[in-house]
Image: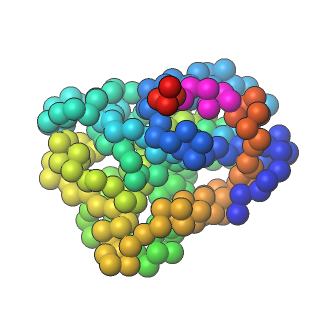
Amino acid sequence: MITPLPATHAGMVQFTDLSARHGLIDYAPLWHTMRAYTDQRNADSPDHVLLLQHRPVFTLGQAGKPEHVLLPGDIPVLQCDRGGQVTYHGPGQLVLYPLLDLQRLGLGVRALVTALEQVVLDTLAGFQVSAERRDGMPGVYVDGRKIAALGLRIRRGCSYHGLAFNVDMDLEPFARINPCGYRDLEVTDLRRCRGERGVDITAVQQLLLDRLQATLGLTLATESTDCAADNVFSDCVIDYSS
C-alpha cells in the first residue's frame, strides 16, 4: 500500500506514477530532468520513485556499442548515461526509476542492484512464475529468457535510471537489437510466462511497489497534483493532446 501522507513527512519517499497522469512518457526529457535533479540535490532533498511506461525507444548505455543496434527501423535510438548496453522501452513495460540518496539509506551500488532484482523475483513469485539471476548478467530471467533489465547511474552518491520489467508487450522490437549486448538472448514478458492465466498490469504494478517498499525499507508517499517537488518531473512531460 502507498501511504497518502505528505511527501515531506520524515522517512517518506516521494512517489509519482507518471503514466497514470500523462500516458506514455518520452525518454529524453525525463532522463535530462532526472540528471538535473541529481546534480542539484543536496542532503535535504527528498528521494523519489517514478513509475511509468515509455514511448517506444532503444537506449544505449554510456558504454553501449552501436553495432548491437541491428535494424532500428522507425524506433528512435538514444545514447544515455546509464550503465549497460542496448535495450528497448515501450508500452506494456513497467519502468521504475529510484532517485535515491544511497549514503543516506546506507546502501551500496551492488546492494541496490541486488535489491531491485529481488523486487522483480518476488513480484514474479506472486504470480506463480519462477525466475532467477544469472552470474555476470544483471537482470532477471525466466527459463533463460530475460524479463527484466537493470541500468543505473550513480552520480554524487545518488541513483537514477533503474529497472525495466516486461509485463505485457509487443516483443518484436527486441529482435532488432542484441538485448543488453548479447547476441541471440531471448526476451519474454509476464503475460507469456503465465499463458492462458493472463495478467493484470495494475495488479502487477501494485505488487511491484509493495515489494519495493518491503525490500528497501522505503515508505512511498503520494503527492498532491500541485506539489512543487512532483512538478519537477511532471513538467518535463510533453503534451501530445494539443
Image coords of residue 142 (percent x, y): 32, 68
Q: Please report the bounds of the magenta region as a residue range.
A: 231-238
Q: How many marks?
A: 0
Is 156 located above or below residue 94 in the figure? above
Q: Quadrant of the N terminus?
A: bottom right
Give the side of residue 136 with respect to residue 94, left or right. left
Instruction: Tell me residue 47's x, y (percent).
Output: 69, 39
237 inside magenta stretch: yes
Q: Is residue 93 visible?
A: yes
Relative image position of residue 229 (x, y in whole percent)? 73, 31
> Residue drawn at (36%, 44%), measured in percent from left and top?
90
- The quarter holding residue 217 reads bottom right
The colour scheme is rainbow
Residue 84 x, y percent position in the rendering: 35, 39
- The image quarter containing residue 101 is top right
User: Residue sitting at 34 percent across and 26 percent down?
Assistant: 79
Residue positioned 32% across, 78% down in the render: 196
- Queried whether the magenta region covers residue 12, the answer comes back as no
Determine whether 121 is above or below 110 in the image: below
Residue in the foreground of this view, choosing between 88 and 179: 88
Which residue is most to the front?
A: 242
Q: Residue at x 38, y 78 (%)?
A: 197
Q: Is residue 45 visible?
A: no
Q: Quadrant of residue 191?
A: bottom left
